[in-house]
Amino acid sequence: MNFRSKSFDELNTKELYEILKSRAEIFILEQNIHCQDMDNLDYDSLHCFFVEENRVTAYLRAFYIDSENNTVKIGRVLTLKHGSGIGRDLMEQSIKAIKEKMKCRKISMDAQKHAIGFYEKLGFIVVSDEFLEEGIVHVIMELEL
């Protein structure tokens, strides 16, 4: 597996196509989420992903959510190989890349409720009550850097 972290302008067309294909596979086909996936946040995001045999097998994006650039939000977190450890590897490598390239103090995310324990093992803490997002129960989680 090959980890990559790139700005939108650094992505080549094949990488972008594979990212969008993997996002559709997980969020539309697997999780039955129907929303506009391409929401213009991709342009200003750091895209972190693993490529294996020309497929994006794990992915997330990170973007600033405050005017001082102290907080980065991650989203669109996915893995094609559930239970393989690739999700942990993605998060660990992505946190390193975010620290290096985005120089923020905090990472925030809207985490699906079933994944709270996974993110807690990485140091994230729940900072909100539960809420529905696209019909799925979520909480806001944060990691102080």
Image (tube, grey):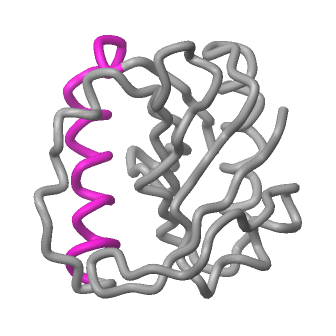
The N terminus - image quarter: top right
Point out residue 112 in the picture as x, y percentages from the top left corner. 53, 77
Point out residue 135 in the picture as x, y percentages from the top left corner. 29, 86
Does the magenta segment cover residue 24?
yes
Q: Residue at x 27, y 77 (%)?
A: 134
Relative to 69, 32 lies left or right = left
Q: Is residue 11 above or below residue 111?
A: above
Point out residue 59 in the picture as x, y percentages from the top left corner. 48, 50
Judged by its main secondary structure, the magenta piece is: helix
Q: Residue at x 30, y 59 (%)?
A: 23
Query: Could you tell me how many numbered marks the image carries?
Result: 0
Q: Is residue 63 above or below residue 109?
A: above
Q: Residue at x 87, y 55 (%)?
A: 123
Relative to 79, 144 lies left or right = right
Point out residue 111 in the picture as x, y percentages from the top left corner. 56, 68
Foreground of the two, 143 or 75: 143
Q: Residue at x 27, y 34 (%)?
A: 41
Foreground of the two, 48 or 18: 48
Foreground of the two, 13 or 60: 60
The C terminus - image quarter: top right
Question: For the magenta stretch, what is the residue range?
Answer: 8-29
Relative to 15, 141 lies left or right = right
Does the magenta segment cover residue 76?
no
Relative to 9, 79 lies left or right = right
Residue 107, by quadrant, is top right
Residue 85, by quadrant, is bottom right
